[in-house]
Image: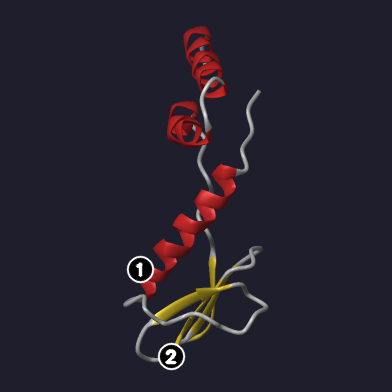
Amino acid sequence: MNEDDLIRRVDALAAVMRVGDEQRIAAIPALKIKVKPLEWVKMDETYYYAAGEDIKITSNGQGWGLSPRDWPHLGGYDIPTLDAAKAAAQADYEARILSAIQTG
C-alpha cells in the first residue's frame, strides 16, 4: 500500500466515523472490509452447519430453513433451494457482523 492508498483509507474511515449506523455500514466497502464467507459442513442431504458459527440449514424435503445450530428448527421451510438458504444465512451473518463494527 502506498501513501496515497493509506490517505484514502484514513479519509474513508474518518467519513464513516461521522455518520450513523446505516450510512456507516453502507460506507464499509470504501474501507475494503469484508466478512469472510461461511464454510458449510454437510452432515447429510438435509442438514448443513456453518463451521465455527451457530448457524444451521435444514430441509424438510419441501424447502430449507435456517436456525441456530443447537436449537430445534422452529421456523418455516420457506427457502426454495440449498443455495438460496446459504445465501440467506450469509446475508444474515454479514449484517450481524457489520452492525457490530464501531468507529470513533
Quarter holding residue 87: bottom left
Q: Is residue 52 above or below residue 60?
A: above
- Residue 9 is situated, as x and y percent measured from the top left of the image, at 51, 18
- Residue 60 is situated, as x and y percent measured from the top left of the image, at 43, 90
- Residue 21 is situated, as x and y percent measured from the top left of the image, at 53, 35
- Residue 2 is situated, as x and y percent measured from the top left of the image, at 51, 11
Q: Is residue 74 above or below residue 29?
A: below
Q: Residue at x 51, y 50 (%)?
A: 95
- Looking at the image, residue 15 sits to the left or right of residue 53; the answer is left
Q: Residues within 10 Å of mark 2 (few under 14, many from 20)?
A: few
Mark 2, secondary structure of its residue? loop
Q: Residue at x 55, y 82 (%)?
A: 74
Q: Residue at x 54, y 63 (%)?
A: 39
Q: Residues within 10 Å of mark 1 (few under 14, many from 20)?
A: few
Mark 1, secondary structure of its residue? helix
Instruction: Return the residue found at the far left.
Output: 80
Q: Nearer the viewer, residue 71 or 42?
A: 71
Kind of residue indicated by mark 1? Ala
Q: Which residue, given by chain and number where applicable, does mark 1 sit on?
A: 84
Q: Nearer the viewer, residue 18 or 42?
A: 18
Q: Which residue, given by chain and number where applicable, does mark 2 sit on?
A: 60
User: Quick one: label 2 or label 1, which is nearer the N terminus?
Assistant: 2
Q: Which dot marks residue 53? A: none
Q: Residue at x 61, y 72 (%)?
A: 68
**Total labels drawn:** 2
Q: Is residue 10 above or below residue 62?
A: above
Kind of residue indicated by mark 2? Asn
- Looking at the image, residue 73 sits to the left or right of residue 23; the answer is right
Q: Is residue 78 above or below residue 87?
A: below
| Cα gap from disc 2 to disc 1, whole angstroms | 15 Å
